[in-house]
Image: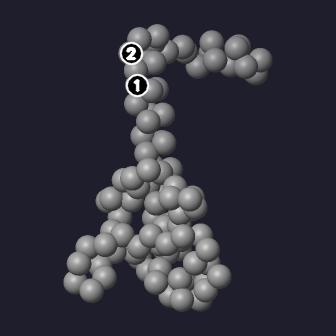
Amino acid sequence: MILTWYAIHIARKEGELMPSIKPVSALKNYTSIVNEVSYGNRVYFTKNGHGTCALVDMAELDELDKQKALLQLMTKLAEAKVSVREEGTISADDLEKELGL
């Protein structure tokens, strides 16, 4: 299997653009592996030639989590706009009745 899922996230090594891909067995020497991780420089692990996991800098992971949450929120807002356009809205009084308030 060709690992293409990492193509956007590449690390600079010896002046060339190279992904940092290691077999899971390389975790036996975890200190040197962890030292390779930095913002924008992930380390990907494979098992039997297939991607299994990655080490990511914590600041980068936090940023990715925020971006994911923002994307999910924007998706829900877009869905809500479509729903309002297609199905309309209800009045506050009708909402209270529906909720039993």
Kind of residue sitting beneath label 1: Lys
In x, y percent, where is residue 18? 31, 72
Q: Quadrant of residue 14?
A: bottom left
Residue 84 place in picture, x, y as percent: 44, 18
- Depth order, front residue of 10/38: 10
Q: Residues within 10 Å of mark 1 (few under 14, many from 20)?
A: few
**Which residue is identified by label 1?**
81
Image position, residue 86 (x, y; %): 41, 11
Q: Residue at x 44, y 27 (%)?
A: 79
Residue 32, horizontal then vertical, whole percent: 54, 89
Identify which amino acid the numbered label 2 is placed on: Arg
Element under disc 1: helix
Find the residue positioned furthest to the right: 100
Above-or-below relation of 56 to 29 = above
Q: CA distance from mark 1 to mark 2?
A: 6 Å
Foreground of the two, 24 or 88? 24
Residue 83 versus residue 12 in the image, above or below: above
User: Count the marks: how many?
Assistant: 2
In terms of depth relative to the viewer, which is nearer, 58 or 10? 10
* Depth check, front residue: 7 or 77: 7
Residue 5 in sight in this render: no
Residue 26 visible within the image: yes
Picture residue at 49% right of the left edge, 72% below the top: 22
Residue hosting label 2: 85
| Circle 2 Cα neighbour tier, 10 Å, few/some/many (<14 / 14–19 / ≥20) | few
Looking at the rendered structure, which numbered label has been put on residue 67?
Answer: none
Quarter placement of the C terminus: top right
Left or right: where does residue 22 sit relative to residue 96?
left
| Residue lying at 77% horizontally and 17% vertically, measured from the top left | 100
Callout 2 secondary element = helix
- Label pair 1/2, CB-CB below 8 angstroms: yes
In the image, farthest residue toward the front? 48
